[in-house]
Image: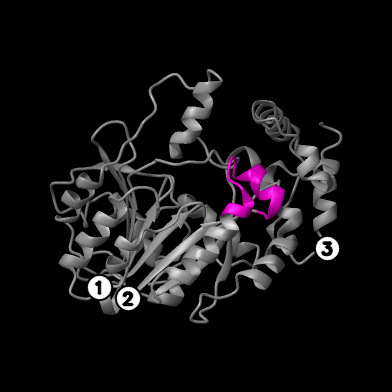
Amino acid sequence: MNNRAHCPAIHNGLALNFKTSSLDVFASQCCLRPDQFKIDPATSFWNNPKFIPLRELNNTGEWDLGCNNCKSLEKSGSASLRTGMLSKYGIEVTLSGPRKLDLLFDISCNLACRTCGPTDSTFWQKHLNDHRGWITAIEYNRRGDDVIQTLKNINLSNLQEVCFSGGETLLGGSYWDIAEYIASVSSNAGSDITLSFQSNGTQSVSEKFHNIIKKFKLVKINFSVDGTGSKFEYLRWPAKWDQVVNNLAELRSTLPSNVMFNVEETISIFNLYYINQDQQYHAAHFSTNREGDVVHHSTHLASGLFSLAAMTTEYVDAMKHTKFAHLIPAQFVEDPAKIKLAIASIKQFDQYRNQRFEDYFPEVAGFYSRYL
């Protein structure tokens, strides 16, 4: 076995996607992979034949095209989900069930973030409905019961990490219902299992859920914070920065001591120029939980309209001598078509939201002056 590109997610990960308007369930080996296939949740599908080719390819040390997110980050010198999992789990290829379980089943959300979209946020759907851009009914697919029924057909004895992705995972109680189920069937929850929530930082955690938190080894809340002050409010619309700051302070002071935090930043054309400022802010104001555990600051690259593939030459020139130059796409060539699509979307939603890109990101707007 060649370990050059070995990924524990491929061999020991499982991502289940219930976020469809039907009752279908889709699976993949990693939440970052674009390929998913429909499964029968009433069967034991861990060794589904569709998993096998990717596992075998990974054993040769070759990268699969669906792993480009991690490959690109590592090529630029950054850590990736793969390297993080490799550090945590090492090399294992013959488990009877997942170490890491990603669950996506509810797109209920109270924000319409610029780097997100209607397939992952009910508020995005409402926002588009308000401007005649969404032609179907708003989907509230809270399929928590389906998740529990599916988990009954998976061997959870190796489980060490459960990751909830939304929507906004701290809205409602369905995520906590699933957490309670996992704790009830896992004898090792208190010693081995980490529960992870992806949150936009606007929601509190009711005290009634604290007892569930205490049943797990750790609970991590990953706050998606792509900027500070007015920049945050532009990117995470219509959230208010002061509300989020106060909410994070309250969560840090009131949640059980086995809760840890992470600040996760989606790097896009909007905020690449300001990463250093954001990291400095978090280091100064949100560096630990109340027990002194470090609040890490992690990043991942945006995809879609506002990815770094839509940078201008001026933008690249401004960043290529900074410590973040490794994030610039390799062999960069300005792509006017991608830039024009990004600018068109910016102008459209600036009009809808009574915002002005140039007022929030003046330096970055300068890099796009030829297109604005």
Visible in this render: residue 322?
yes
* Distance (Cα) linking label 2 and label 3: 42 Å
Residue drawn at (42%, 67%) of the image: 220
Q: Which mark is residue 217?
A: 2
Q: Which mark is residue 189?
A: 1
| Horizontal relation, residue 239 to residue 342: left or right | left
Instruction: Please report whichever mark, 2 or 3, sits nearer to the chain's N-terminal start.
Output: 2
Nearest to the observer: residue 299 or residue 353: 353
* Distance (Cα) linking label 1 and label 2: 6 Å
**Would you say the residues marked 1 and 2 are in contact, meaning their CB atoms lie under 8 Å apart?**
yes
Residue drawn at (54%, 65%) of the image: 249
**Res 274 quadrant in image:** bottom right
- Quadrant occupied by the N terminus: bottom left
Instruction: Please report whichever mark, 1 or 2, sits nearer to the chain's N-terminal start.
Output: 1
Residue at the spot of label 3: 321
Q: Is residue 211 above or below residue 53?
A: below
Q: Position of residue 161 (x, y in %)?
A: 34, 67
Three-letter code for the amino acid on which mark 1 is drawn: Ala
Q: Secondary structure at mark 2?
A: loop
Crowd band around label 1 with a 10 angstrom C-alpha radius: few (<14), some (14–19), many (20+): many
Of discs 2 and 3, which sits in the foreground?
Answer: 2
Q: Position of residue 192 (x, y in %)?
A: 29, 76
Q: Write down the region rendered in magenta.
A: 227-243
| Horizontal relation, residue 260 to residue 113: left or right | left
